[in-house]
Amino acid sequence: MQTIDNFNFAGKKAFVRVDFNVPLDENLNVTDDTRIRAGISTLKKILSDGGSVIIASHLGRPKGVTEKYSLKHILPTVSKLLGVDVGFAGDCVGEEAKEKAAALKPGEALLLENLRFYAEEEGKPRGLADDASEEEKSAAKKTVKESQKAFTGTLASYADVYVNDAFGTAHRAHASTALIADYFDTDHKMFGYLLEREINAVGKVLSDINRPFTAIMGGSKVSSKIDIIQNLLDKVDNLIITGGMTYTFTKAAGGKIGHSICEEDKLELANELVRKAQEKGVNLVLAVDAKIADSFSNDAKTDCADVDKIPDGWEGLDIGPKTEAIYAEVIQSSKTILWNGPTGVFEFENFTHGSRSVGEAIVEATKKGAFSLVGGGDSVACVNKFGLADGVSYVSTGGGALLEAIEGKTLPGIKAIRGF
């Protein structure tokens, strides 16, 4: 398989799929350029070789051309970070894009307009009436799929080389993330530096494991993490289940959880996961106490209680001090650590302590030689908020892509280049 380091881009035009789906404020200014910065090294490598780049990304979830989702809003940030005056094509497959891509000279860069302005990027029909028949839906889907081939072919025609550096969308079989790879031979398609780093990081926590291996799974719903938990039970030594899921497990064991969030229809599933952990010899670590509140508010009255003895009218919004100590001991004795999901409602300042303590324990373990991977939007937001990102081994840029990789799924954007 071709690698970006081994390829000389001199005189070549590279179509680079990045994930520059960054947040914008009300004035359409970039508020967090993390994802853009993460992709700059790939672009700079191509330009420094004497190649040119056609940069492609999506922004948001537009249903057609939408001004607030135009990539022209990120152009100043991309130009500044890349150190090049990046050109812009106000369409991704129109005549302007074709002409500007054809005119690119070595060392020049062009940013295409939002790929998702076209239904063909995702291969999903738009504008169907809510009461559309199955026949109408099928016909619309077929039409989009047929035009998707032409759309993909147009994108591919701009370049000599395809580089996928968009891990955040690697789990989607979209035109620019998977289908386009078929237009390039093995020697002219490759991963960018970011995607290489993501693949290596996931590999270290799923395949190249230094034990003990601890996974910390947070989140509000067991149902959204069930596949990940099932896969991890075959790999980890310790599994910390935290966040809102805590209270489903607690109630399933007969505990009193007050007004805490709970999936009533997943109680038996929670007990089944406890049994599976026992069968596989996995140390399943659950909270023993909680920081509780009398309402879902940062300004609520708070107290601490045993997690299975939360009074009526109160709800758990974070872990308590006893649980923090238990988690920290497990984490700091680990050699491989995966963290996905906070311990509580970290958006409320009064309920950040648990998540911060987990992050700090991961940093301490990392200092002692552990490999630590933090992924998933809220976990990444946590380490950034607490200034801990530099203290962990790797912070993933992928949300859904990381979760699907952890579940053991094959990601289309990776398979398209690697073949598996």
Image (tube, grey):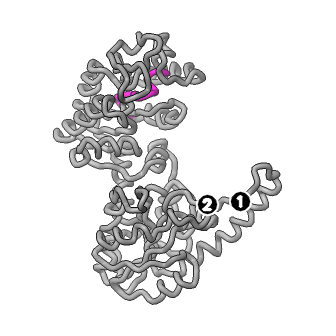
Residue 58 appears at what percent x and percent y? 50, 63
Residue 288 appears at what percent x and percent y? 35, 16
Which circle marks residue 127 in the picture? 1
User: Is label 2 in a helix, a strand or a loop?
Assistant: loop
Residue 379 appears at what percent x and percent y? 36, 41
Residues marked 2 and 1 touching at CB (< 8 Å): yes
Residue 98 appears at what percent x and percent y? 53, 84
CA neighbours of label 2 inside 10 A, class few (<14), some (14 to 19), many (20+):
few
Query: Label 2 amino acid?
Result: Lys
Is 20 displayed left or right of 141 in the figure?
Answer: left
Nearest to the observer: residue 16 or residue 301: 301
Q: Quadrant of residue 122?
A: bottom right
Query: Label 1 amino acid?
Result: Gly
Q: In the rendered structure, does residue 369 fall within the stretch colored magenta?
A: no
User: Is label 1 in a helix, a strand or a loop?
Assistant: loop
Q: Residue at x 74, y 66 (%)?
A: 143
Is 368 displayed left or right of 413 in the figure?
Answer: left
CA neighbours of label 1 inside 10 A, class few (<14), some (14 to 19), many (20+):
few
Q: Quadrant of the N terminus?
A: bottom left
Residue under label 2: 63
User: Range of the magenta residues?
Assistant: 236-248
| For residue 200, above or below residue 261 | below
Q: CA–CA distance between discs 2 and 1?
A: 9 Å
Let me know if residue 61 appears in the view. Answer: yes
Q: Residue at x 43, y 10 (%)?
A: 311
Let me know if residue 187 appears in the view. Answer: no
Q: Residue at x 32, y 84 (%)?
A: 50
Which circle marks residue 247 in the picture? none
Nearer-N-terminus badge (2/1): 2
Nearest to the observer: residue 227 or residue 303: 303
